[in-house]
Image (spheres, helix red, strand yellow):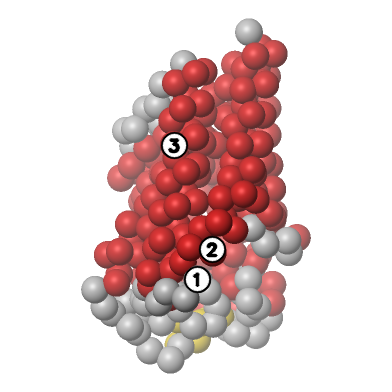
Amino acid sequence: MRARAIALAGAGVLATWACLWGVAPFADHLVRGASPIVAEAGFGAIVFGTILVLAWGLGRVAGVSWRWAGFSRGAAIGLGALLLAIGYCALAGTLTTGAGSTVSLALPLGALVILLQVVAEEAMFRGVVQPLLVRGVGAGAAVPLTAASFAALHGVLGGLEPVMLANMLLGGVLFGLLALTRGVGAAIGAHFAWNAFEQLGVGLDPNPGHGAFGAMIDLDLRGAPLWGGSVAGLNGSIAMGIAVVVAILFVLWRRPA
């Protein structure tokens, strides 16, 4: 049973990687020439919709059940960690105002695209891969192993900077602990709150500027790269690492008895 669980977990990771290598170029070809909003929404729907279907199918084969409760609690933790990271950047002097906000009807569509991405990633990694690894190697090893595969996924997507990869690893540990103690819904909430507010709320991803869907407030990070002043922005800063470690310690402190 342990060997089967480990093998299925590996299959989930490999299927996700195969999707990025195979489906992503196909999706990019389909949306080429479309407006930025349509292109980003279409690309996200195709790629992450496929990952979500794969996660659902593998979960059915593996007999994994998902606990969806805890979204709001997770969202509060994710938003709190993001605000803490932004505060560290402000103290370091790298937080500045950008060209200006671009509030439009595209914001709700952007939120839906981010939600789909987050649900797909968390359903696969914390909803399928991590529970299977818990069966195979125990919770103590399953959380960091799943987080490592999650960070490697972002490496495939282009986040090869060491600090950014370390932050993705820490983020994976945070989401893994939330899923383990509160349910997949808590991991989805934390992941969504961070991504949505970072991109659509304050426009810190991408850095500088903002994405195709716009942002309610346009902030940029300029100056010291380790405090966000690079193209990696907040995700490539030690401010994010510190904030996520604080969130991890909070989750461990507040974990159910």
* Distance in Å between CA atoms under marks 3 and 1: 24 Å
The spot of residue 251 in percent (x, y) is 48, 40
Q: Secondary structure at mark 3?
A: helix
Q: Are marks 2 and 1 in contact (CB under 8 Å)?
A: yes
User: Which residue is the site of mark 2?
Assistant: 28
Where does the C terminus fall, quadrant-wise? top left
Pick the front one: 67 or 14: 14
Sequence order check, earlier mark of 3 and 1: 1
User: Which residue is the site of mark 3?
Assistant: 53
**Is residue 13 shown above or below 159?**
above
**To which quarter of the image does residue 224 belong?**
bottom right
Q: Secondary structure at mark 2?
A: helix
Instruction: Residue at 54%, 63% (x, y): give it.
Output: 28
Between disc 3 and disc 1, the foreground one is 1
The answer to whether 61 appears left or right of 238 in the picture is: left
The spot of residue 56 in percent (x, y) is 43, 30
Instruction: Residue at 50%, 71% (x, y): give it.
Output: 32
* Distance in Å between CA atoms under marks 2 and 1: 6 Å
Which dot marks residue 32? 1
Q: Secondary structure at mark 1?
A: loop
**Is residue 83 shown above or below 23?**
below
Q: Residues within 10 Å of mark 1 (few under 14, many from 20)?
A: few
The amino acid type of the residue labelled 2 equals Asp
The amino acid type of the residue labelled 1 equals Arg
The amino acid type of the residue labelled 3 equals Val
Pick the front one: 84 or 41: 41
